[in-house]
């Protein structure tokens, strides 16, 4: 099990799927937001108690995001920029306060 993702992950520009479950990751590096071709990000079953980067909205191609079984407390404001997102899984995210701000009216 790993407890951190190296900043160098952001240099994998052709990466389309990144599955980091289950591990002991507390935070995702900001460089992960440079993966503009990323379609699937699965960080389920990780604490993520330090959250996800505010720049997550730069993942313009992202279609699937799984944050299940994490201690995530909020979704950054840029989350609403994930316009390609088709699947968001938040199973057992008991610390999550609200994500209603990101739902269409």
Image: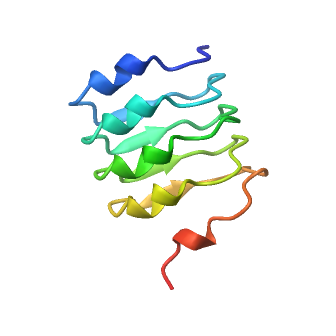
Residue found at the far right of this picture: 94
Q: Is residue 62 above or below residue 51?
A: below
Image-quadrant location for residue 21 = top right
In the picture, measured across the screen, residue 43 lies left or right of residue 11, that is right
Residue 89's place in the image compared with 52, above or below, is below
Corner quadrant of residue 46? top right
Residue 89, image x, y percentages: 57, 53
What residue lies at 34% left-to-right and 64% top-to-bottom?
83
Q: Residue furthest left?
A: 14
Residue at image location 62% in from the left, 65% down from the top: 99
Name the residue nearer the viewer: 67 or 13: 13
x, y percentage for residue 90? 63, 53
> In the drawing, does residue 3 fall left or right of residue 19?
right
Q: Is residue 43 left or right of residue 68?
A: left
- Residue 69, given in percent of the width and then of the height, sits at 70, 42
The residue shown at (26%, 42%) is 36
Comparing 13 with 78, the one in front is 78
Residue 78 versus residue 15 in the image, above or below? below
Count up the numbered dots: 0
Tell me what residue is drawn at x 44 percent, y 47 percent: 56
Q: Quadrant of the N terminus?
A: top right
Left or right: 63, with 20 as reference point: left
**Image position, residue 104 (x, y; %):** 48, 80
Residue 69, above or below 88: above
Colouring scheme applied when the structure was drawn: rainbow
């Amino acid at each position: 099990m790993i407890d951190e993702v190296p900043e160098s992950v952001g240099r994998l520009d052709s990466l389309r799927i990144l599955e980091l479950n289950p591990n002991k990751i507390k935070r995702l590096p900001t460089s992960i937001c440079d993966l503009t071709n990323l379609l699937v990000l699965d960080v389920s079953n990780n604490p993520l108690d330090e959250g996800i980067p505010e720049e997550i909205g730069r993942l313009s191609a992202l279609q699937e995001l799984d944050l299940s079984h994490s201690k995530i407390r909020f979704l950054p404001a840029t989350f609403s920029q994930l316009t390609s997102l088709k699947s968001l899984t938040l199973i057992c995210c008991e610390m999550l306060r609200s994500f209603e701000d990101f739902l269409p009216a």
